[in-house]
Amino acid sequence: MSAPLRRDQKSISSEVLDDVTSGRLEVLAAPEVLEWALKTFHPRIALSASFGGPEGMVILDMMHRINPRSRVFVLDTGRLPQATYDLIDRVRDRYDKDVEIVFPEAGAVQKLVHDHGANLFYESIERRQLCCQVRKVEPLNRKLSELDAWVSGLRRDQNVTRTETPQVEVDRVHRGMIKVNPLAGWSADDVWRYVRERGVPTNRLHAKGYPSVGCDPCSRAIKEGEDPRAGRWWWERPETKECGIHIGEEEEGSGI
């Protein structure tokens, strides 16, 4: 297979595009999808892991088994809980992995806090999304400009905004690069079964009732019977619970 064109050329090779659009990749198992992705794009492909959900850890483990030099990065918003930083260190030790840390622009954060205060996200959906834009979306866009493809831990059953997630897609939001969602068809039970069977390290806050861990002030433990996403931005409606990383501007606008 020929190498894909560089992302700054706003195009991908016809062979890769055919693989993606033909549906052939949609019937592959998650490790097979990742094997295709790493063979096609490494080293210009990386996993975006929050270290706050088991999905990213499962994918990190799979990618490492396929290629120990596979890449992973995390968006350090400056508001992550200590448990997340501890997990990053565990991953470095266990996998001998260089976890690439991506920070928001200091000046943008300083202006955000100066203009709106440190806890602006509680005031309105618009201000919460502004905080996410500065601390997560812009840093992600900056990191993705270095890559031709990226990997996420999205699953279709996580939220109403993710029900149509394919295993591999052309990411129109990020200038037509390839986005790989190898666990799109997995359930939460599938994810945790893999964690147990492989002894994959996870965020210790899961044991305290946090199904998903994001920024510290925007995450909480859930009660028995609550939706797993109820602990993220719990003061908002389900249809607005995205930070902007996985949806386009037109979708963000329609949801608020």
Image (cartoon, rainbow, N blue to C red):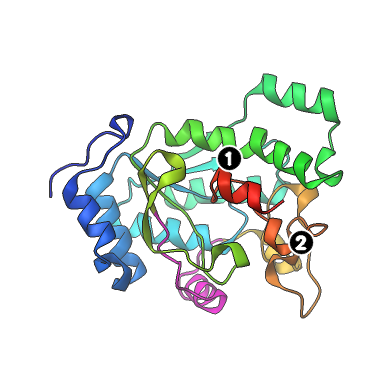
Which residue is nearer to you in this view: 215 or 176? 176
Mark 1 is on which residue type?
Answer: Leu
Tell me the magenta residue range: 180-201
Locate residue 100, reporting x and y percent.
48, 37
Does residue 146 appear to the left or right of 105 in the view shown?
left
Does residue 240 appear to the left or right of 99 in the view shown?
right
Q: How many marks?
A: 2
* Mark nearer the N terminus (1 vs 2): 1
Does residue 230 appear to the left or right of 163 in the view shown?
right
Quadrant hosting residue 23: bottom left
Secondary structure at numbered mark 2:
loop
Task: In the displayed orientation, state which residue is furthest to the left.
Answer: 1
Q: Determine which of the numbered discs, if any, sits on residue 224 in the image.
A: none
Locate residue 221, reporting x and y percent.
78, 64
Locate residue 242, reporting x and y percent.
64, 53
From where the camera sits, is residue 72 visible?
no
Mark 2 is on which residue type?
Answer: Arg
Residue 181 inside the magenta-drawn segment: yes
Which residue is nearer to you in this view: 114 or 256? 256
Residue linked to disc 2: 237
Task: Kindly report which numbered mark, 1 or 2, lies closer to the viewer in this rendering.
Answer: 2
Q: Residue at x 73, y 58 (%)?
A: 232
Report how far apart the C-alphas of labels 1 and 2 lie in the structure: 24 Å
Residue 40 inside the magenta-drawn segment: no
